[in-house]
Amino acid sequence: MQLVDRGYRRFVRFPKPYVELLDCIQQHLVPRTYVEVGVSTGRTLSLALPGTICIGIDPAPKLRAPLGPTSRLFTSTSDDFFAHQDLRSLLEGRPVDLAFIDGLHHFEVALRDFINLERFASSDSVVLIHDCYPIDELTATRERTTAIWSGDIWKLILCLKQWRPDLQVNVADTAPTGLGIVRGLDPDSTVLEESYDRIYEQFIALPFATLDRSKAEMLNRVPGDWNTVRSLLPTMPFRPYNVTLFRGRQAVAGMVAAGRRYVAGRPPKI
């Protein structure tokens, strides 16, 4: 098992630490269903294990990673998707086991995404939210001016803590801009939807300086290592799956690909 894990981590490349953390979460939970808002290149959507029903939502994806046979990509905004698609039917009647919000980096859009996803969740579901632990004010503006950009998604954490104290909300401090982890979802809750206008008015103009008092405490920061994150997740997978065999196959495939690059004069980037 340790040899398989070492081979997997050596030959399966992850561009950023949060992507590797997402990979660990996928293999720990083995979700039956997975919904991703903001697909971009498809790298994170492709982390889903075989057999997972995957729904990707992005108005302008730039796919570089192949999607599996059980993945469907919808090229629309998330608002349009949830307004016109029957997510329950797309997931074959199952709830959303795992979701990842990484769309437009505006607080109110991420809030609507969360509201829409929770309607199809269960009490065991996990919702991940990217960009919840901003680096600084410059990279946390509503308009993008920097290469790394988290927008004002951090406000969603404050919002959920205040308006939905029944939720378990934490932010893993993983590079570059954190990963929110939300559990204890309630598909019957209407608090956020019914109070949306009030919430918008409360948080939309909230300055970044609000975090000056104690960013870590206000955003429920936890270390971004796997052992810590794993303790925040359900202990049992959603479905049986041989993760060790999967990792072994991926390691071998990565090793072969690295060998081909080496023979072609392009040493593998490890």
Image (cartoon, rainbow, N blue to C red):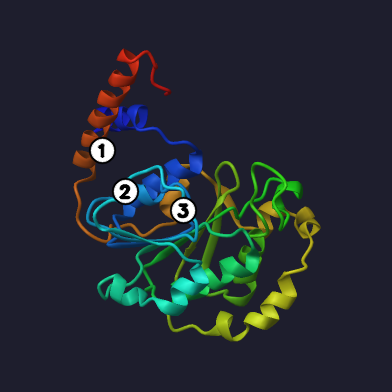
Tell me where residue 31 sits by quadrant: bottom left
**Does residue 79 show up?**
yes
The residue wearing badge 2 is 27
Tell me where residue 154 sits by quadrant: bottom right
Q: Position of residue 34 (x, y in %)?
A: 35, 61
The residue wearing badge 1 is 247
Q: Is residue 157 left or right of residue 50?
A: right
Secondary structure type for disc 1: helix
Above or below, 89 relative to 30: below
Mark 3 residue type: Pro
Secondary structure type for disc 2: helix
Query: How would you rate the neighbour count of disc 2 (Cα within 10 Å): few for under 14, some for 14-19, many for 20 or more?
Result: many
Q: Quadrant of the N terminus?
A: top left
Disc 1 to disc 3, C-alpha distance: 27 Å
The residue wearing badge 3 is 61
The tag earlier along the polypeptide, 3 or 2, is 2
Callouts 2 and 1 close, C-beta under 8 Å:
yes
Callouts 3 and 2 close, C-beta under 8 Å:
no
Mark 2 residue type: Gln
Above or below, 230 relative to 127: above
Mark 1 residue type: Arg
The tag earlier along the polypeptide, 1 or 3, is 3
